[in-house]
Structure formats: structure tokens, C-alpha cells
Image: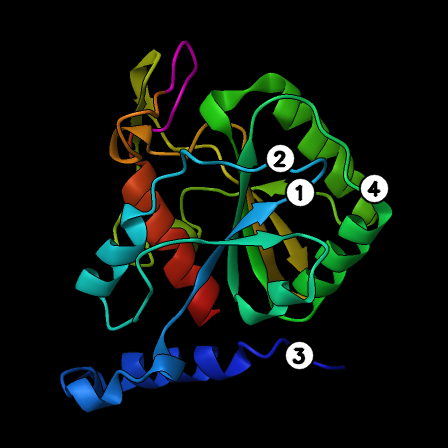
Amino acid sequence: MKQIPALTAFLAVLALLLHPAVAEDPAAEDEGSFIQAANLVYANNKTSECFADQFLAQIKKDTHINTKPRFSPVRLDSAEMYEHPFAVMTGSGSFVLTAAQRDNMRRYLERGGFIVASASCSDKKWVASLRGEIGTIFPDNPMVKLEADHPIFHSVYDITTSKYKKRGMEQLPHLEGLEIDGRVVLIFSPDGLNDTENAGPNCCCCGGNEVKEAKRLNVNILAYALTH
């Protein structure tokens, strides 16, 4: 089965992880060794302008994974999806994917891509729509809640609890995973992973809820996606 072109980027990442000295040589950091993350455009041009990208720079500081510091907007039904091994899908309000978007999402995830899906500010309508779409696309692969010992909570940082914008009690962030052939290919958070405090002056989680550990958790998710 044809794999996504970004497979070469995966291999470059693994080489850097296994041989840290390579990353210290500026000549080694060529264009092909960088990971480009996508911000998905889906449904009727729904996307997010307030999902903070600071975790992309943070993972480069904390590991030898070379990332471009900004998202690239990518349509869910486009061939460009396959140039990005990692994608963010977020937003608010109800939505319905087109048949072409559903087909491309399924192929992308089956061929090595990874998506983190998060409701902006824990928007319940978006959560319901996302659950419905994943159930339609993968009827035999239900999303399963990840427990505290899952590697995604410990890939770079050890995350055992998080504060929430609207909840006083700290708790393990609620994450669910979609698995294909033994590999988690999609992480879903019903609570906001947007990290809007670092997303820009015009972004806020106004009246909604967010995971306060979002930045470090997104670092973990990206590291996990690229090394599993």
C-alpha cells in the first residue's frame, strides 16, 4: 500500500533521535529533516485560528525533532494532506464532513498519518459532530479512553494531572485514541487543547473550558505520533 510521502521525514526524525550529535551540525538540518504540521480545513471551510503553535517550537527545544514553527493550512480532502505526518483538527459548532473528506481522512490515517482532534474550548456541539464522523468513517474502530500509564502521557514530559480553566480540581486529561492495526493514529480530546493563552491577542477561551497542560501535552502527542 502506498505510504504518505512524509515517510522520509519520519525516518529523518528517528535518525535524529537515535544519533543526537547529528542535530548539532547545522548542515544536517536540511529542508527534508523538518516536520511540517497541518491545521486542517474541513466541512464548509471550518478551521481554527486559535490553536497555539508554540508546542512546535517547544518540542524542538526539548528533543532532536526538527519542526517548522507554524502550522500549514491544509484541506482535509486534498493530496497535500500526505505531505504532513501530523495534523490538528479543531473548531467549534456542529459540522458535517463531505464524502471526499471522509475518504481522505480514512486513507491518511491508514497510511501513516496522525491527527489530534480537539474541541475549541470544549464545545459540546463540535464534540458530538466529531464523534459522529469518526463513528461513520471507522465503524469498527471505537475510540478508547487512554489510561494514565499510556506512553502518550510520558513521551517527553510526565503528565499525571492538569488544571482546567473552569474546574478547580486537577485530574488526568481525558484523551481518547483511535487505533488501526495496533497503532494509535488519532487522539481526541473533548476538552480544549488550544492553549489560547499562547495563541495570539485575538484568541481566548471565552466562557469555555481548556486543559491548562495543553502545551506540554501537545508536545507529548507529537513526539508519540512521530516515534510509534
Taking 93 as reference, is 131 above or below it?
Answer: below
Q: Does the magenta stretch include residue 209?
A: yes
N-terminal of the two: label 1 or label 3? 3
* C-alpha separation, residue under disc 1 versus residue under disc 3: 22 Å
State the residue in front, 159 or 84.
84
- Residue 138 visible in image: no
Q: Name the residue under label 4.
A: 136
- Closer to the chain start, of discs 3 and 4, is 3
Label 2: state its secondary structure.
Answer: loop
Where residue 99 appears, as percent x and y from the top left, is 86, 47
**Dot 2 corresponds to which residue?**
46
Q: Is mark 4 on a helix, strand or loop?
A: helix
Q: Indicate which disc, 2 or 3, sits on the residue closer to the N terminus.
A: 3
Look at the numbered discs 1 and 2 and tell me whether their residues touch, using CB distance below 8 Å. yes
Tell me the SS state at disc 3. loop
Circle 3 packing at 10 Å, graded few (<14), some (14-19), many (20+), is: few
Q: Mark 2: which amino acid?
A: Lys
Estimate how packed mark 1 is, as few (under 14), some (14 to 19) or many (20 or more) residues with alpha carbons within 10 Å: many
Circle 1 residue:
42
Q: Alpha-carbon neighbours of circle 4 within 10 Å: few (<14), some, or many (≥20)?
A: few
Q: Where is residue 39 in the image (x, y as percent from the top left)?
A: 51, 49
From the image, tell me which residue sits under label 3: 3
Q: Magenta part of the protein: which range?
A: 205-211
Q: Earlier in the sequence, mark 4 or mark 1?
A: 1
Say what amino acid the circle numbered 4 marks: Thr
Residue at the extreme top: 207
| 34, 153: nearer the viewer | 34
* Residue at (72, 81) in percent of width and height: 2
Residue type pointed to by label 1: Tyr
**Vertical placement of 147 versus 19: above or below?**
above
Is 164 left or right of 187, judged from the image as shown?
A: left
